[in-house]
Amino acid sequence: MFILSLGATAFADSTLVPVSDTNILNGLSPLNWVIKSDFIGAAVGGASLKVGFTGTSRVALEIDTTIIRTTVAARFPVLSWSVNGGSNQTHQLVKGETSVLLASGVSDPVIDLYLKGFNPFDDRYRGDAPANSVKITGFNIDKGGTTKPLLLPAKLWMNIGSSLESGDAAVYYVGQGRPPNDDWSASDDARASYPYLLATHFGYREIRLAYGGYNWQGNGGIPNLSALIDNTTSTVSRLTGGLLTPRPDIVVVYLAGNGVPTTNSVINGLAKIRLRTGPATRVIVMISPNGTNRGLITDGFNTYKNNSQDTNLFLVDVGNFPYVSADGSHATAAGHQTIYNKVLPAFEKVIP
């Protein structure tokens, strides 16, 4: 469902809730948003924001699309959200729009919004607000309305991956094929992906760092894992005092394709994750369901584990198995469900 976007000036007797509002900041999925005094922004599928309102029956998302550099409408990011736990609504951002109506005629709405899809061929990393990102400047609500605190899961689960893990082509049907270069955004569904299903199954709040085209060494303008774990964008750090803050309880790395990893890239990536999380975080490396680069990743994993004697580092490898896909690689929503069901027992052995 595509929602008509409306300018903020279309509403009389309204209040603009700034992005500095405590309940908005608390509702952000940690560690994958840029937080500034006048905007919040993200360029990764699955980044989410859950916020409740009281004293209003209307909520509009105020956005800045001037940062988006592409002139191809189909390449713009796609948002998805639900209101009070209802069905998901979807909207692809449009050049020049400043506001997206999220709820109307709903008393005390709770908005659960996530970034559903991005084009992997446009910049998602350089600057405070990359040229292919979602930049939010506030929420427009009825005059007198306010935000309200929500109870969110306390435990954090960080998913690191590439196109499969970001849900690219998840809304395609079986055998539909690889999306054309301009059509990736609308083919994606970040919450259909099996990493999201795993995190929510165990009752964790998800942090997503998954980019189409990504690998251990970095790709598509995104740096290698050793650098990515430190930085949200090229100008914004994730670290406080040298650590990820808040600290993820679980970090899962699902990186297999998009080139051949080196042993050192696996070792360095795992070492940096451990350095930035501390010893208590469980770090899990999952081998791809099609076995891509199994030997190289396993060798890097074993070398690091043996040298470090890291007792909170685990490998999940359930062997090769089929799943339905759009193009032989990118799973459909049903394919993600298959992967989730297949690997869940292995995760249940290492997740407390």
Image: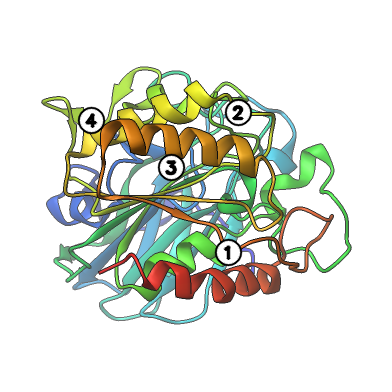
Image disc number at residue 285: none
Residue depicted at x 29% and y 81%: 107
Classify residue 18 as left or right of residue 128. Answer: left
Of callouts 2 and 4, which one flags the residue occurring earlier in the amino acid sequence? 2
Residue wearing tag 1: 318
In the rendering, at what x and y percent does residue 344 appear? 48, 73
| Image quadrant in which the N terminus is located | bottom right
Of the two numbered discs 1 and 3 in the rendering, the one whose residue sits closer to the viewer: 1
- Could you say whether the residue bearing mark 2 is in a helix, strand or loop? loop
Q: In this view, does 341 lie above or below 276?
A: below
Of callouts 3 and 4, which one flags the residue occurring earlier in the amino acid sequence? 3
Q: Are marks 2 and 3 in contact (CB under 8 Å)?
A: no
Residue wearing tag 4: 275
- Could you say whether the residue bearing mark 3 is in a helix, strand or loop? strand
Q: What residue type is labelled 2?
A: Pro
In the rendering, at what x and y percent does residue 329 appear? 77, 53
Measure the C-alpha gap from mark 2 to mark 4. 21 Å
Of the two numbered discs 2 and 3 in the rendering, the one whose residue sits closer to the viewer: 2
Of callouts 1 and 2, which one flags the residue occurring earlier in the amino acid sequence? 2
Q: In which quarter of the image is residue 57?
A: bottom left
Residue wearing tag 3: 63
Of callouts 2 and 3, which one flags the residue occurring earlier in the amino acid sequence? 3
- Could you say whether the residue bearing mark 4 is in a helix, strand or loop? helix
Measure the C-alpha gap from mark 4 to mark 1. 28 Å
Measure the C-alpha gap from mark 1 to mark 2. 20 Å
Of the two numbered discs 4 and 1 in the rendering, the one whose residue sits closer to the viewer: 1
Q: Are marks 2 and 4 in contact (CB under 8 Å)?
A: no
Q: Are marks 3 and 4 in contact (CB under 8 Å)?
A: no
Measure the C-alpha gap from mark 2 to mark 3. 38 Å
Residue depicted at x 25% and y 77%: 108
